[in-house]
Every structure is written in structure tokens, then in C-alpha cells.
Amino acid sequence: MKATLLIICTIFAIYATKVHSFSSDDYFPIYSSYVLRHGDRTAIWPLDPSKDSSPVWDNMVGNRSAGQLTSTGVSMAYSKGQTFYNNIIDVDGNNSYALLPSTYNFSTIQFRATGYDRTLMTGYSFLSGIFYGDNSAPIPNNSSPVPIHAVLKTDDPLLRPYNTCPTLEDFQASIDDIPELWAEYEERKPILDEVSQKVGSECTGPSTVQSSLFDPLTCDRYHGYLPDNVTEDEYQVVKEMFYLVNQYKYSIEDPYYQLYSCNFLQELHDHIDSLFTDEYPTADAHFYFAHDSTIMAFRAGLGIPAYKVPEYVAHLGYEVLSKKSSPYRPSWVEDRVSSQGSNMKDFYIRFVFGDNSDSFDATPFSSPYIDAYVASLSDGDTETLPEGYYRLDHFMDYVSSSVWSSDKFDQVCGNVPSNEMDWYWGMLIGILASTVLLGVLILVLYCLRLRKSRASPVVGGEYSRVLTDAMTDIVGDPDLATTTLLE
């Protein structure tokens, strides 16, 4: 009896939950979206040159300037591009599982960067590697410059939401008001003060750790240099304090965590949706060249604690996968079969994070928020998947139902989109103008009526009626108007 019951329960469990052996080797990408940090740069908040003789300043592309890509940064972006060339490009022209063709085609790949020199220069260096990764001539015959789109750094809710959202700016500026963080700062204050004195900087609280110490020292240390007798142990204290600040700045417990990534996830949702609704989608791949803060913000938006600064040219990837046995192929493949109209249940999405500067290798990671959403589903059609893999329809449903829209972003941030503002002002001006014109028209008609009435020497007939009507308009009483005229 017990054995029979066990068999029945086992069969029920098998049918109640769809479990299958999932091997990533059986799948290939038909769409990918990658976010890359820029390459090696100079300090955004440099120290006094008399206190800082770091070789980073000798590595500049151009004159000494803050926050600029170095020649090392150019090289590492090019090398990173080569690693992508070797992994997602159809190098020999015979790989129909490759994500992209070997030459640039605007309909298959698109690029965007934030409005900073270092991200734009990183993008162009990366593209040189990804399209000319076989070390051919810098500008081969029949080649074409690759456009990188960008918007003003102060108007980029997609990649720099904290620059366009007053709510996020206020939240990040409020870290000095957190007692627990101040307690951590006070504990390290003697060492922080000593380092500040050595480098001629001024660290006055948690919010100034990055600009006064961490940023310039980290840029120096990357080139094997620490200024004015700053020790490695002292640098580690600075780094530890900055990471504590980041734990609060990119808090995944704060209700505003969605502001960091909702716009990007919505755009990713739209790009993927294009795969299944358009014969030729918007592109087979999108690349975004941004910042360490962008990657940390996007990871925080997926529920990943983000306090560690990603390495230069680290990348965050979102890859839509199809079975190799399926007929679907990216749009560049000749005689392709489009995924238009197919069932998203047959596809998967993988999140990966490559925290390295010289490799395409990346580690899949899961989102606690999406995990919780999938666990809440009661359709009896779940799967046992590896870390970082999700059924595509589950991901798309999660974004549609749980991720804030761009309108919600504007609402929470207190922003009014410029097109809506123009509409509001247009309506207001139109109403005021109409009111004024109507008032002028009424006044003109009234004056004409009154003038005709006064033009007649006789109070009677039509003139009398007109004059009586005009007086009635003034005093509001017909009898009183008649009496007034007779008098």
C-alpha cells in the first residue's frame, strides 16, 4: 500500500511540475543586450598635482583632464571588443548560430552611450575590436564608420536615472542623515583624516568619501601608485567605507529601487517583444556604453546587492536563447526563419555579469525579484533551470506586471515630460486667449449697440427698443431702464 502511494505521488509530482534537463550547450542567442563600463580613466575628482605624481596622468589621451579615458582604457576596450568578436561574430561565414555577422549592419546591431567622452571613446575603441578583431587594417576596404547614439548627460533617464530624477538625487544625498552610516564613518575617521591630510584633501562625511579619497586613490592605485606615503592598509579602509556608502546608496530594500532600472527593463522588454511581433526586429543586439554606477544601479534594480565597483569594461548581459534544434535564427542569417508569432514559452533569457577587463566569460546570476514572481505563479508549468536562466514569457510578464513604466518613473521623480509640459502650456495659453477675445467681442458689440441708440433724437420705435435693451443691460431691470430713459 505504501509503495503504491509513493508511486502515485511520484507520478503526480512529475506531471504537476515540468522538470527537464537544461543544458546551455543546447541553446544559442537570437538577441542580446549588453551594458559595458568604460575603460581606464583619470580621476573625476583629481588630487592637487603637487601631491599626486601618478603615472595615470602620463597615460592620457590628450592633455591632463579629469574623468578622461587613458590610452590604457582605449587598449582594454579594444581587447574587450576582440573577445566579443571571437564569441558572438560569424567569423568564418559558416556559423548560423552566431549572433552577428562579421561586418557592421545597422539593422542588426545598435549602439548607445552616455554623453561623456570616456564612454563614447570606449564605444569606438570597442567597436574597432568587435568588427576588426582579426587584426586586419584599421580601416579595411568597404568599411563604414559605426554610429553611437548619445543624449545629454543631464537628460538620460535610461542610463543615468540619478541625473534626471530629483527623488533619486535627494535619496542619494541623504546618506549623511543615516545614523548607522555615520557610526561606521566615525569608527574609521582617524584613518580617513590622516589619509586626507597626506593627499591634501578634505573628507567631511560619508557623502564625500568618494570624491575626496576613493576616486583619486583608486585611479592611482590601478597604475601601481599611491601618493604621499598612503599605505595599502589605509587605502583598504577608504575602500571599505566607500562600499558601505554604496550599500545605502543602492539599497535594494528601499521602495525606490525600481527607479534605477525600470526604464532600461522596459526598453529591453520592447526590444524583445519586437522579436516576436516584427518580421525584422529593431536589432539582434544592443550595446550600451556607460559607467560603474549604471551597472550597479541595474543590478540593484534586479535585487542584487550592489556595493562593489565593477572593473573597467566589465559587462552586464541579457541574452535571449533558442534551442539549436529550432529553425529560428537572427535577422542577418540568409534564409532565416523569423521568431515572429512563435511562443515565448519555448525561449529563455539569461542574465550574466562579466566583472573582468579581458574576457568574454561571464557568470550567470539570478534576480531575487523575478525568482519571487516565478514562485508566485500557479500555472503548474515551472521548470528547473540553472542559475540566471528564466523562461522568456515569465520574464516578459514580470516586466509588464511588476516593473514601473516610464510614466510611473516621471510621476515618482516629480518630472513632467517636455511634450506633456508643452501640451499643458498650449492649453492654458489657448484658454486665456479665447477668454480675452470673447471679452473684446462682447465689449465691441455692446459699444456698437449703445452708439446706435444715442444716434437717434427720438425715444421710440426701433431706436427706443435698442436703447432700452442697452440700458437694461446696464441696470439689470427693464422697468428701471424705461424710467431712467424717460427722465
Image (tube, rainbow, N blue to C red):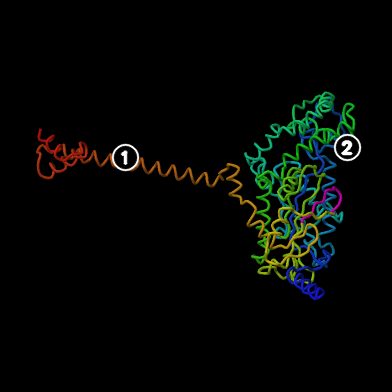
Q: CA gap, disc 2 to disc 1?
A: 75 Å
Which image quarter is the N terminus in? bottom right
Q: Say few, some or many: other residues with alpha carbon within 10 Å of mark 2 (under 14 / 14 to 19 / 20 or more).
A: some
* Residue 72 lies in the magenta stretch: no
> Residue 130's quadrant in the figure?
bottom right
Name the secondary structure under disc 1.
Answer: helix
- Which label is found at residue 482? none
What residue sits 80% from the left and 72% below the top?
6
Most extreme residue toward the front is 1
Residue 79 coordinates in the image, percent (x, y)? 85, 50
Q: Nearer the viewer, mark 2 or mark 1?
A: 2
Going by the image, does 231 lie left or right of 331?
right
Residue that numbered label 1 is attached to: 440
Residue 300 lies, with reference to residue 30, above or below; the image says: above
> Residue 106's quadrant in the figure?
bottom right
- Three-letter amino acid code of the residue under disc 1: Val
Residue 104 coordinates in the image, percent (x, y)? 76, 58
Q: Earlier in the sequence, mark 2 or mark 1?
A: 2
- Which label is found at residue 223? 2
Name the secondary structure under disc 2.
Answer: loop
Q: How many marks?
A: 2
Part of the protein shown in magenta: 351-360
